[in-house]
Image: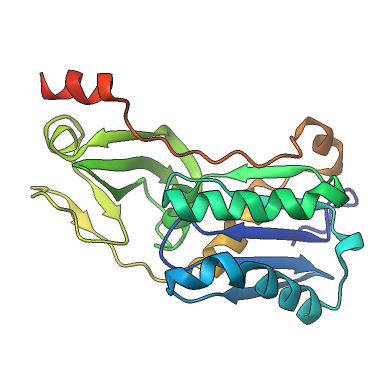
Amino acid sequence: MSKKPDALTHILSLDTATGEPCACLHAHGRAYLARLGDDQRARSIGLMPMLVDLLLQGGGTWAELQLLVFSHGPGSFTGLRIAAATLAGINSGLHLPLLHVSSLAVTARQALSDGPLWVLEDARAGEAFVGCYQQGIPVIPDRCMQWQHIARTLEAGNYVCHAQAPVALPGWRRLPLSIDRAEALSLQTRAECPAQAGLRELPVYPVPNYMQLSQAERNAYAG
């Protein structure tokens, strides 16, 4: 982590946007990683034990934490809702600033690509969550689009995703996810972590970013 005098030293991050919930703890100059596995049933009962174990690994306490980080979506509706409830419960007593980071930015980090990189995650119902990143920085804002609209309107390029695209994407090249999600979450946390002076601008309550298209938007695309 950064050695700047005003840098934060104790940060807890949580991501449940994809199939494998994970977390990371930055403490005492090190990063500690945890993964819950892809058993969907474990989400509701396994997140808190995972976070408690992380604190034990890092030799820290809840009281030492300076910042909570929420990978707030877009992604799994159930996963985001459970993560938000977990962090809200934790912060009901701690009242810590809470940083929201894009789950698509975390996915982009998994590819270890230096150039512009699309993230195309299947949102079901013919839709996709779309982002474009370069070294963790958004090139365009995250959005939800219909798959057929992506193929017609976006310039083809390198992309990453967790599931095979349900439509043909001529000219696009899928890159592998080279590192696991917990490590990518750690990298994105460090990239977006504010200095202590910026903490007062952050909220204390987690807000999921579900980002599904409205029915009016679906109708507009269909037309």
Residue 137 in the image, given as x and y percentages of width and height: 51, 42
Residue 214 horizontal side relative to residue 152, left or right: right
- Is residue 17 depicted above or below 176 in this figure? above
Residue 165 in the image, given as x and y percentages of width and height: 18, 54
Please tell me which residue is depicted at 50% across the width and 38% down the height of the picture: 209
Whether residue 221 can be seen here: yes
Q: The C terminus lies in which quarter of the figure?
A: top left
Q: How many marks?
A: 0
Please tell me which residue is depicted at 46% across the width and 71% down the height of the picture: 41
Q: Is residue 166 or residue 133 the one in the foreground?
A: 166
Q: Is residue 121 or residue 28 the one in the foreground?
A: 121
Coloured how? rainbow
Residue 108 in the image, given as x and y percentages of width and height: 42, 54
Residue 34 in the image, given as x and y percentages of width and height: 61, 75
Please tell me which residue is depicted at 86% across the width and 63% down the height of the picture: 62
Please tell me which residue is depicted at 56% across the width and 55% down the height of the picture: 82
Residue 61 horizontal side relative to residue 159, left or right: right
- Is residue 87 depicted above or below 146 in this figure? below
Q: Which image quarter: residue 205? A: top right
- Is residue 147 depicted above or below 59 in this figure? above
Residue 212 horizontal side relative to residue 180, left or right: left
Residue 137 horizontal side relative to residue 165, left or right: right
Whether residue 135 can be seen here: no
Residue occupying the far bottom of the picture: 57
